[in-house]
């Protein structure tokens, strides 16, 4: 057990990013296929192949999930994932050719780093080349390279976020894991307390040795919910842009049908709502995939319950492991 989604049998993670441009992608590979479902709760999503995951549709298994930055441009990275799988003859057997099934979701990071650089097919391919069972890097990596949170007033008082992963062994050899890129409109909360999000502006960046240093004083949080009740907050909401989302996946070695995987994806959103306040807004594109790779016997309620728990833990990891970048302070020093 390494405490991440790769603890689940049949799951590998690969990542690639452009550190200067602050954008990247994360690939969850399932070389032998995984029964999959998805639930899109946010109202500003950017996705690919999610209709295919509807339980009434034909294909039962996916071969990879792509999470990427770059807004809609980032969906291009899925082509590189398909090329990687095609070269290895991994895909849905149509009788004529094996077609890799690669659903994807993107987040908006064009407001940080270089907006002209996006994850593309080559970056998706390179991410696949790094895929392994090792614990994936967290923080300012992959799809989380340009992620940020607390954006009621744009970047001015936002914070750096990123990518996180976690896993839970729930007994009888059953493991549930999650991986998530957190680019939320709201704040991240742990035990009822805001730990990252919209800053109050009381403490700005302090220049030390010619560089901005955010670790010289305590962070003061404005609380997005409270600010939305103010005149300034209400006025800003009228013009707020749809530049936020949380995208991720949960996986288990328990046996699930496509219907059950869809339910697990739905339940995993409960963990998102516990950790992010507010969640599932008109300004977010919150999307969670669910993957089943094994044959362990369990019930969907148990798996979904712990999918929510592990998603919450992964979100907390995403902000705790993110360092300052792009002019935004991060919790990792």
Image: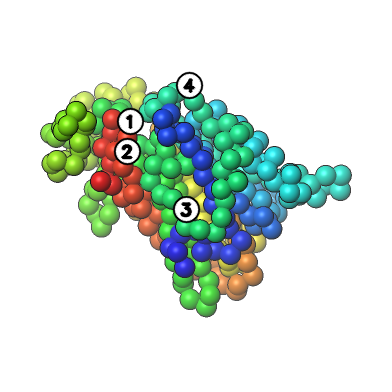
Q: Which residue is mark 4?
A: 116
260 or 182: nearer the eye? 182
Q: Earlier in the sequence, mark 2 or mark 4?
A: 4
Q: Quadrant of residue 132?
A: bottom right
How many C-alpha atoms fall within 10 Å of the one at disc 4: few (<14), some, or many (≥20)? few
Q: Which residue is mark 2?
A: 160
User: Which residue is painted at 51% across and 44% down in the image?
Assistant: 15
Q: Earlier in the sequence, mark 1 or mark 4?
A: 4
Q: Which residue is mark 1?
A: 326
Q: Which residue is mark 3?
A: 136
Q: Quadrant of residue 157?
A: top left
- Please indicate, yes or no, whether residue 301 appears anywhere in the rendered image: no
Tell me the element at label 4. Answer: loop
Q: Earlier in the sequence, mark 2 or mark 3?
A: 3
> Residue 143 got which mark?
none
Residue 210 point in image, percent of width and height: 19, 28
Q: CA distance from mark 2 to mark 3?
A: 19 Å
């Amino acid at each position: 057990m390494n405490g991440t989604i790769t603890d689940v049998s049949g799951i590998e993670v690969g990542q690639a990013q452009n550190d200067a441009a602050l954008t990247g992608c994360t690939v969850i590979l399932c070389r032998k296929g995984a029964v999959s479902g998805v639930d899109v709760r946010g109202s500003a999503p950017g996705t690919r192949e999610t209709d295919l995951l509807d339980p009434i549709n034909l294909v039962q298994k996916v071969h990879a999930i792509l999470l990427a930055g770059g807004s809609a441009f980032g969906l291009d990275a899925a082509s590189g994932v398909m090329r990687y799988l095609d070269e290895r003859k991994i895909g849905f057997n149509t009788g004529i050719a094996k077609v890799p099934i690669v659903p994807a979701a993107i987040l908006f990071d064009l407001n940080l780093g270089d907006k002209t650089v996006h994850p593309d097919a080559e970056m998706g391919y390179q991410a696949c080349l790094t895929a392994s069972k090792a614990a994936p890097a967290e923080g300012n990596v992959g799809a989380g390279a340009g992620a940020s949170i607390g954006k009621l007033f744009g970047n001015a008082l936002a914070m750096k976020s990123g990518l996180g992963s976690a896993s839970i062994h729930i007994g009888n050899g059953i493991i549930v894991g999650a991986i998530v890129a957190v680019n939320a409109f709201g704040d991240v909360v742990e035990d009822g307390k805001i730990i990252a999000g919209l800053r109050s502006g009381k403490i700005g960046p302090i220049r030390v040795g010619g560089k901005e240093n955010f670790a010289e004083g305590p962070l003061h949080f404005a609380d997005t919910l409270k600010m939305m009740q103010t005149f300034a907050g209400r006025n800003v909401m009228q013009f707020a842009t749809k530049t936020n989302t949380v995208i991720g996946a949960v996986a288990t070695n328990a046996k699930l049908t496509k219907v059950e995987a869809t339910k697990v994806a739905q339940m995993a959103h409960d963990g998102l709502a516990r950790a992010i306040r507010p969640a599932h807004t008109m300004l977010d594109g919150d999307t969670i995939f669910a993957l089943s790779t094994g044959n362990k016997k369990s019930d969907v309620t148990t798996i979904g319950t712990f999918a929510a728990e592990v998603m919450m833990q992964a979100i907390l990891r995403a902000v705790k492991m993110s360092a300052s970048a792009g002019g935004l302070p991060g919790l990792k020093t």
